[in-house]
Image: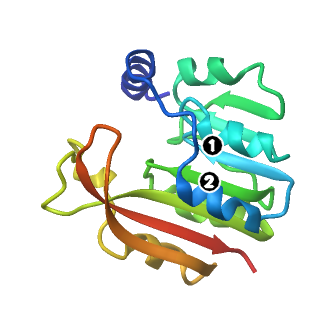
Amino acid sequence: MAIDDKRKWNKRYINNPIPDTPIDLISKYAELARIGKALDVACGMGRHSKYLASKGYCVDALDISSIAIESLQQTENIYASEVDFDTYSLKKDHYDLIVCSYFLKRELFPQMMHALTKKGVLIYETFVYHPDNEQAPSDKSFLLEDGELESAFKHNLEILFYEEYWDTTMKGAKMKKASLVARKN
């Protein structure tokens, strides 16, 4: 397991309040997927897992943080597991809905497509590189390039919604984001 990543995220979850409400993209588009099995990739403290479970999904909530996973252990319809995405493989043809927000590991893109059931929906939102970003991560590889998210999925999934736009982070910093909603046919 990536020990440094685990320490970083455990520290962040202990010291910083995390919103309980889902991002707008998920609350707006989750209804496009049939109610069934959902996957929350890099779930953090589980705001999306909790939201999806409240809508009737059985949710696999995956994260590297033991703090995050422990916080979800006794939540109905959420099956939380501590995983390292450097070595973990997603289950093939298993999920009716996959959500991923503010986490980027390009090597997971093909796995996400294969993990969706027929007509399964992917909802993905994360940050895009731009020189005017006010809160960029220390490693540029954690940021998408313009058009990259759409390009990564458009040949294998039907794009239902795609947008790149400027927004502010929880800390009030201006950041460029990309949002994608896609379906497996």
**What is the quadrant of residue 49 in the picture?**
top right
- Residue reaching furthest left? 131
In the displayed structure image, the side of residue 42 where residue 115 appears, left or right: right
Q: Position of residue 185 (x, y in %)?
A: 75, 81
Residue 183 drawn at (x, y percent): 69, 74
Q: How is the image coloured?
A: rainbow
Secondary element under disc 2, as helix, strand or loop, is strand
- Is residue 19 shown above or below 27? above
Which type of secondary structure does the marked residue at label 1 adopt? helix
Q: What residue does disc 2 label?
A: 99
Residue 59 screen position, x and y as percent:
76, 42
The image quadrant that residue 70 belongs to is top right
Residue labelled with disc 1? 48
Q: Amino acid at mark 1?
A: His
Whether pointer 1 and pointer 2 mark residues with C-beta atoms closer than 8 Å, the reply is: yes
**Viewer-side residue, 8 vs 159:** 159
